[in-house]
Image: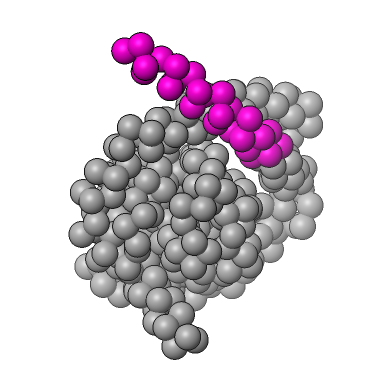
Amino acid sequence: MKDLLPKIKRIIATASPRALKTILWIVRLTAIVSFCVFLMQYTGLINWISAYVSPLFHHFGLRGDAAIAFVSGYFINIYTSIAVIETLDLTVREITILATMSTAAHAIIVEGAVLHKTGTPTWYTITIRTLAAIALGFVLNLLLPDRPAYAATEATEVPLFAIQGDFWPLFIAWAKGMVRLAVMMSLLIYLLNILQRILYEFGVMARLSRLLRPLLALFGLPEKCSFLWIVANVIGLSYGSAAMLDEVAQGNISRREINLLNTHIGISHSNLEDLLLYASIGGIWWVILLSRWVMTSCLVWGLRGYYRLRE
């Protein structure tokens, strides 16, 4: 016990500066992106984008008005997507398809920046996640039973700018929400970064890696990705950013390995909270999870094949 406390103090002293640096970066980035999206919502630009992509959604077995749920989640986060879904009268089938697409591609700017910071280019993350969401929607529409016969529709005429209400009440509501989010993110990121160092110090990570080896091998991921895979699946990319950046900075994972991991977790992460949320509004959780696992496995093994051919 006497040796334990000094060791933990040393870990905290070592991990704190890097964790605080990451907190400042991720909170600043989130605030900037969130404010830009707030302006898009306030001016009606989100509605305009949704209206012009809605004709594509019949290919996914979805009505045109489902587009706003996907687009809002794409730019903001899962919570906004769910909020919109709850205003629509969607079937279990439609919610499952829409949830799968949204979990594959959401918060695209912030999470793309996090993965870029670890070494994967933003253009690659945005491209692979967007195409994966489209492919998943198309395939699930073909595979799931009771496929509806939605006809192709034309884009709805929606003005490019249409003010959505009084600016200051909306801005104050956004600012309060942003402050709450910043506090929660800061606490989670800091505590997780300390926990990461403690797990390494006491050899827990080695045991976790051995335990997850068969599952990661199935996904085409190296064993040393275990901790980051757990972090991404339990709390997501934004909250897990400090742990991810620290892992890369420590040299525990190579550039090629991080690209393989980011291909997987970009499309399939936060599989605890997100699945519970979508299941609570009617989504079939195992379809949402397994379909993305199949997609990410194909992509990761394809990327491994590309690396091998290049060598």
**In the picture provided, is 144 more to the left or to the right than 192?**
left
Classified by dominant secondary structure, the portion drawn in magenta counts as helix
Residue 119: quadrant of the picture = bottom right
Q: Quadrant of residue 60?
A: bottom left
Residue in the picture at 63% in, 30% down: 17
Q: Nearer the viewer, residue 149 or 308?
A: 308
Is residue 281 toward the left or the right of residue 40 in the image? Answer: left
> Could you tell me which quadrant the N terminus lies in?
top left
Residue 274 rendering spot, x and y as whole percentages: 38, 43
- Measured as percent of width and height from the top left, residue 181 is found at 58, 28
Q: How many labels were placed on the picture? A: 0
* Vertical arrangement, residue 185 with respect to residue 109, above or below: above
Residue 291 shows in the view: no
- At x 45%, y 43%, the residue is 236
Residue shown at 37% from the left, 17% from the top = 3
Q: Position of residue 201 (x, y in %)?
A: 38, 33
Residue range of the region highlighted in magenta in the rendering: 1-28
Magenta segment includes 60: no
When the figure is inspected, residue 44 is found, relative to residue 21, above or below; the finding is below
